[in-house]
Image (cartoon, rainbow, N blue to C red):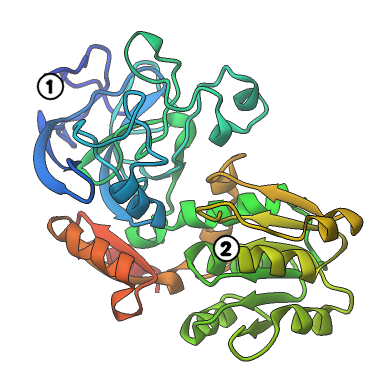
Amino acid sequence: MTDPAPAVTTANADWSGVKTSPDMPVPDQMRAWVLGEPEELTLQDKPVPAPGKAEALVRIDAVAICATDLEILTYGTPALIEGGPPFNKGFTPGHEYMGTIAALGPGVDEFEIGDRVTVEIHAGCGQCKRCRMGMYTSCHNYGLNYGDQDKGHRANGFTTDGGFAEYAVNNINTMIKVPDTMSDEEATLVVTAGTSMYGLTELGGLVAGESVVVIGPGPIGLLAVAVAKALGASPVILVGTRENRNAIGKQLGADYTINPKDEDPVARVKELTGKGADYVVDCAGNETTVNQSVHMTNRGGRICLAAFPKTAVAFDLGALAVNNIYLYGIRGEGRSATHRAMAFMAEKRFDARLVHTHTFPMEDLNTALRYAKDRVDDAIKVVVSMRQNSKAAEQAAE
């Protein structure tokens, strides 16, 4: 551990007791993208936040764009800032980031300045019923983290400032060390893989030898294929309408791919599995796929909704009940699933880099968002890099 450096003086921040290092000086101000009106982001100067107890200041090196970021920019939800929509409140979105620890809050000795880390989104309040159960992504005090009613809940990029900035504060429980052989870009994908891991965890976790169907070849769906295969599932079946993404699914471990444009996915799954799938992970989230999930799952099987319809849907509840099928919903990357996903990625059990298609510098965030939203040039996972040499670790690994 480095010796404490003089406290950094930053506006509206308490740096007393914070450990810094002359090898990684922390500026007073940072650049950050700030949300104004819906879909209005401007690059501004903001004070660098000071880490408190059980927190560290992370210099952000790369951040991936998630579909939820796009929803927040347009609709506000599920972000909740000061008890309401995040617009015109100085809020910085972005949640799938990694970086380097630049300062340590009072009493923190679990990490060192200079450690490369990737992050979970949710810290939770740590005191409600759900947090005590390990379900901190379902924290009962979600959003109650401001003013006199601060319950200690934190969800960076949702209820507190996120990663479209040069620095962010993270609770130590949300940080995972990144191996030197992993590039910045790949490390941003741990949250995505962690969400997929969480879905399979809630379905039971022990999927070795069981059949798993994944519907929807988006980033979470593709990495759900990878995680399921790494956990020993057999066969792993991917359902998707985009053949280029189905091909990536095959590279990540799918034994079979089904294009609903060409054949009935329910009939094909039953043909491949006999009586239907043991587990289905719906990463598309619409009325059609919810019903497909119900009808392709065998008796006593389990369905995870990793995506959700934006409006109420009609689905065959009777078939669900009479066949004793269990239905689960997940929120985010709970139960430390990102730690397990990182273990798989660090051991090269699957190559998450296959879903990373584009990289842009911080100044071009709006272009990066457009690529992600409109799927320009077949974009899947778009990463914003804060460093020009972020490919060095990846090249060293190869």
Q: Residue at x 70, y 80 (%)?
A: 265
| Type of the residue with mark 1 | Thr
Q: Which residue is mark 1?
A: 10
In the image: residue 155, left or right of residue 362: right
Label 2 neighbourhood size at 10 Å, few (<14), some (14-19), many (20+)?
some
Residue 197, image quadrant:
bottom right
Q: Nearer the viewer, residue 117 or 252?
A: 252
Disc marking residue 29: none
> Disc 2 marks which amino acid?
Asn
Q: Position of residue 183 (x, y in %)?
A: 35, 61
The picture places residue 386, in percent across and down from the top left corner, at 20, 54
Q: Residue at x 64, y 84 (%)?
A: 258
At which x and y percent is residue 239? 62, 77
- Residue 244, position in %: x, y? 47, 85
Q: Is 76 located above or below residue 19 in the figure?
A: below
Give the residue number, with chain letter if any, for mark 2: 286
Q: Tag 2, which secondary structure?
A: loop
Q: Nearer the viewer, residue 130 or 73?
A: 73
Which residue is the extreme one toward the top?
148
Image quadrant where one finds the C terminus: bottom left
**Is residue 154 placed above or below 66 in the rendered structure?**
above
Q: Earlier in the sequence, mark 1 or mark 2?
A: 1
